[in-house]
Amino acid sequence: MSSYSPTYALLIFLLVSILMFLLFRPRRGWYWIIKNNITVNEKTVTEDVLKYLYHNEISGNEVNIISLTAVLKFSDNLIIDIVKKMTIKELIKFDGYVLSLTESGRNYALRIVRVHRLWEKYLAEKTGYDKVEWHGRAELMEHRLSHKETDLLANQLGNPLYDPHGDPIPTNQGKIAKLKGVALSSLAVNSVGRITHIEDEPDVIYKQILAENIHIGSQLRVVENNPKRIIFYAEGEDFILAPIVAANITVDVFEKDVAEEENTSRLSSLKINEIANIAGISKEIRGDSRRRLLDLGFVKGTSIKIDLKSPLGNPKAYLIKGTSIALRNDQASKILINKL
Amino acid sequence: MKKNSVENIIALSNDLRWKIGDDFHDHLAEGIYADASEIVKNTVQTDDKKQQFRLDSKIDNIVTSKIWGFPIMFLILGLILWITIIGANYPSSMLANLFLDNIHPILKGFAANIGMPWWLDGFLIDGVYLAVAWVIAVMLPPMAIFFPLFTLLEDFGYLPRVAFNLDYLFKKSGAHGKQALTMSMGFGCNAAGVVATRIIDSPRERLIAIITNNFSLCNGRWPTQILIASIFIGAVVPSSLSGFASVSAVIGIAILGIFFMFFSSWALSKTILKGEVSTFNLELPPYRPPRFWKTVYTSIIDRTLIVLWRAIIFAAPAGAAIWLISNITIGGESIAALVINSLDGFGFLLGLNGVILLAYIVAIPANEIVIPTILMLTVLVTGISGGEGAGVMFELDSANETANILKAGGWTLLTAINVMLFSLLHNPCSTTIYTIYKETKSLKWTIIASILPLIMGFVVTFLVAQIWRLIF
């Protein structure tokens, strides 16, 4: 106790806190970085190369060794070394400078894609992780699950067809459905369609789409489309996007006009004393939340009106089937209604 | 041939799966509801229902209004707490009188008559009996008042409206509005508050409510706060203001607890709990006249007695431990004194002392016996006159005498403030810890719920102590 001084004690405390923060802060903490780096091995790099080639094959881009090393976040030496090994194993082949998948390489890639999308589906349905985190967590998981575990997972999830972003999940025989639709940015004014897919990469654009409160499964009509901006009307609201953002949203365009959903709006826009019929629950409400809402009677055709507003305006209580149920505004924005 | 047809069926089912799409669960639910509402329309007659609904919405419009919603809520909660704290004093002192002042001497006399050896007499009567009697005397009355009142409000249908009013605040910290109720229940007893989290059906929000319930200042801790505030905080201001100052200090601590509850709810939902499933919905049931006697009966049986029983189970061994550490000596010093000496350095860093830390370790079964243990241990190590002997917990009728003993133990204003803070921020009592384990069925969450407030307590008292010493 002889050397005690409150200043020193405080300084030591400060140092320890800073150290703990640097080590364990979410995502970028040194501890996590080291832990993740230790798990990087040949398998991870191989699978990431295959996945990258597969995605570019789908979008029709050519891949060479330069673009490969630029995109993958491993050291160049490691990538080149592994690419060599992969050619020997006949997973990939060179046509001049261009790299492409062999038949067995494609099958392998599909398996990884299957795990990735299944795991995203799992995170969406069975856990509470935020949408923004799904992709990163699936990136880690896709290298870990074995064939058997993957099939078990698929079974548990009821063999889903699409992942939460709308991408088709390959079957365990390696079959994969084609994604229907075109990029929102390429649509002509007044075309009508349904959002079938929201790309989750790159992160920056995905976050912008989420911030706009755009939901998968929404029916939309394009109002304006020029190099500056794209405006579309969906669920009673106008949405304004930059073309680069709109390019990451895929829309399935309707052949003939389907006008019935035009006056659909979101429950959050309902005002006191208005009465509406429920038109459905957005695909964005998943898992337990969705089942609970269905159980409570939030099904198509049920009439609904506002019963009470809480003093702070959120949540609101809705009168449905004679019962007063409180929902938060962000939930209400994912329930669709037809106002009467 | 047969195998072929099985394969055909599987192929067909795969095809059909793609055709019906992902929505078939929804369509099924819609179909069931459509059928059900058709049946209801044909068979159920609704007639007098409208009348009743009008009264309900009138009450609702008042208790959830922008102007009246919050004042009514605080008034009711304040009133319940006031009735509990004031009302429990009389039965508590009667029970204390009976158990501690009458039965205890009789038991001692009886033990002396049959020639029981001093150590058995001390172990059983001064240790085990005294701890159990103490816990019953101080725990039973407040719980028997608080829980029935609270349950009556619940039965009436008011509590869901409180959750409705406050949900937005709780949503900001990642929690559920119903946590307002479990938090309020925690003001009565944390163990009961933890049990009450069953009303939250979303897994993540329920865990948050369980882990943070300990930040509600429970009935066992109010008396400690009031006693110390009136001795030390009341003394630094002019005597005309002392009552006001000490009451404000206690309320300040309770509000600080609410602040910590919100803060750690937010931190938990952003870190270790972010993967747990989170859902929200809240039913606002119609009001109904509470079934008075049934409610009183069930709340006393279901809540009070269960909690009390658990407390007794834990209090008995703790009483034994308290007596043993004070009476077993190693090299001329009691175990208690040795432990206190080794804890003194750490205690000093936190602005506390070894006696207080040891008291919080051995008095883990119930916060109610912390002050009696501190008094007994202080007398033991300082050697001043007073008290009833080694290992015999006691409390004094006059605050002045208590103050004298504590000051002889080296207490300053800083010690008092930090004891108040530490009483708010430390591990839950063993009854609560056991209840958390029963409710979560998980060792991991039980440990987190026990350690987290303790770490916060260490950090807060440490910082307060250093800054205090820098300034004064």
Image: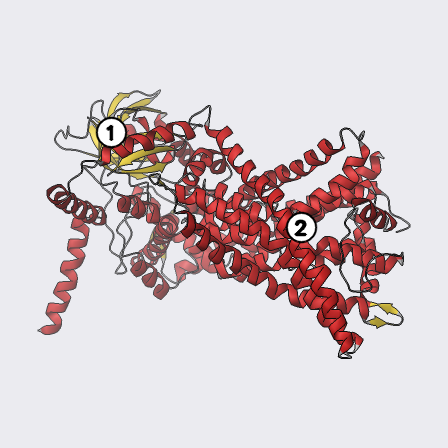
- Confirm whether residue B273 shows in the render: no
Residue B385 left/right relative to A102: right
Q: Position of residue A244 (x, y in %)?
A: 37, 29
Residue A141: percent from left, percent from top: 43, 55
- Tag on residue B417? none
Q: From the viewer's perspective, is B411 left or right of B67?
A: right
Task: Identify the residue at image location x=34%, y=21%.
Answer: A229
Question: Residue beneath label 2, please?
Answer: B455
- B84 or B38: nearer the viewer: B84
Identify the residue under disc 1.
A220
- Splitting the image into 4 quarters, where does residue A37 fall? bottom right
What is the quadrant of the C terminus of chain B in the image?
top right
Which residue is outermost to the right? A2
Identified at 26% across, 37% down, the residue is A320
Q: Nearer the viewer, residue B372 or A77?
A: B372
User: Would residue B101 appear left or right of B61 to someone viewing this image?
Assistant: right
For the point 15% across and 61% down, the residue is B11
Query: Residue type at mark 1?
Result: Leu
In this rendering, the answer to whether B241 lies above or below A140 is above
Helix or strand or loop: what does disc 1 sit on? strand
Picture quarter with the N terminus of chain B: bottom left
Residue that lies at the very extreme toward the left in this rendered image: B1
Q: CA distance from mark 2 to mark 1?
A: 52 Å
Please provide percent x and percent y for residue A225. Answer: 28, 21
In the foreground, A326 or A89: A326
Please state the horizontal and vertical placement of residue A132, each as a whole percent of the image.
43, 41
Letter of the chain that mark 2 sits on in the rendering: B
